[in-house]
Amino acid sequence: MKILVINAGSSSIKYQLIDMTDETLLAKGQCDRIGIDGGNFKQKNANGVEYKVEVDIPDHAAGIKLVVDALTDKEHGVISSMSEIGAVGHRVVHGGEKFSGSVMITEEVIDAIKECSSLSPLHNPANITGIKACEEIMGKDVPQVGVFDTSFHQTMPDFAYMYAIPYEYYEKYKLRRYGFHGTSHRYVTARAAEMLGKKPEEINIVTCHLGNGSSITAVKNGKSFDTTMGVTPLEGLMMGTRSGSIDPAIIPFLMEKEGMSASDVDKMLNKKSGILGVTGGVTSDNRDIEDGAKNGNERYRLIESMLCHQITKYVGGFAAAMGGIDAVVFTGGIGENNPQYRTRVAENLKFMGVEIDEAVNEKAKRTSDENDISAAGAKVKMLVIPTNEELMIARDTYNLVK
């Protein structure tokens, strides 16, 4: 069975086509600037052959049609007809408390996703649009599955997910910690267990998904026990443009001093903070931070130190909360490609048995390989595992449809 994996944003569609016979990636691509002037589409097949076109994409249905047409095209396509697509798996950002696992898409499920839109007003409506567009172009007979960023974290105990605000707000609005990047944390947990030669339920680990968006999860006996992101992806670590956790009193202070509205504060914390904010609006790309720090930029060195300190603090705290861990896992663009951060965090965590082989750590840079970078005899392993959220979505879709 071939599974089409869709990640629909408000003005974009990213996709992959995966053959589940051997989990081979056949093609991947994206539509950009949907509903905006200057639309473009690109696709790359398994052989690296790329197809690009600049074309107006008025809506998501037109985008899905572009995807299907490209996949079935005689020159640059990878399948002969749309009938080869057995099912579609959708990334859905927020499932609230309604979904603890992936589900077949029905009208009732779509209604439930809509209900969660108040918790994710930017993402969930776009995810629904992607689902509806697939149904319009591919027909109702093609099964569709929803895979939720939040579902992996539904195993958290109440003392980990509740906030110390008036309980009525949890009852009225379901304000609690939900966590995100769940598909990534679930994927690397399964891979870490295999690398450690154990079953997932036999391991306690901390998984660090570090990229433009970052989150760290405590995984106890193979299940999410606690995580850094909250009601939204804003809480926790500093990120590319997100502030991460701050003193909440900063918000009314700035509203009074700067005359900012709630919308202004929300935009500032989500779009103008994090790495971008500390650089003074120069860059949100950690690769720029690496280069600048090496060349003596003190502000960029500060950012590196802030991030390493925060990673250490969360990993150490989660390890204590679980009564010890077997491994620390790094994944995501920064986690996989920045050996210096791994070195600094390992040095900070040396007291609890983390120790790495620097030669192996340096080699595990900008590769797609899994690596155990631990030194011989290290009591707590450090693993580098490239994440594969799309494959996780395809697996869930295949298993549900099958």
Image (cartoon, grey):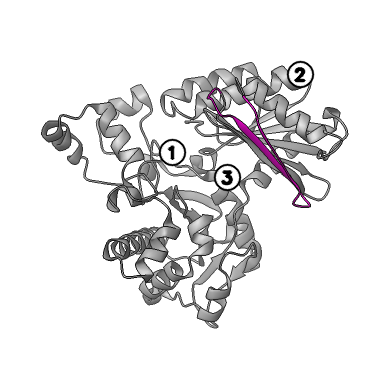
Q: Nearer the viewer, residue 72 or 235?
A: 72
> To which residue does mark 2 refer?
139
* Outermost left residue: 257
As helix, strand or loop, the secondary structure at mark 3 comes to: helix
As helix, strand or loop, the secondary structure at mark 2 comes to: loop
- Seen in the picture, residue 170 relative to 217 is either above or below; the reply is above
Is residue 67 in view from this perspective? yes
Q: CA distance from mark 2 to mark 3?
A: 27 Å
Task: Please give the name of the residue rendered at 38% of the width and 28% of the height, measured from the top-left corner.
Answer: 174
Quadrant assignment, res 13: top right
Q: Are marks 3 and 1 in contact (CB under 8 Å)?
A: no
Amino acid, disc 2: Gly
Q: Could you tell which of marks 3 and 1 lies nearer the N-terminus? A: 1
> To which residue does mark 1 refer?
178
Q: CA distance from mark 3 to mark 1?
A: 13 Å
Residue range of the region highlighted in magenta in the rendering: 35-56
Q: Is residue 53 located in the magenta-colored stretch of the structure?
A: yes
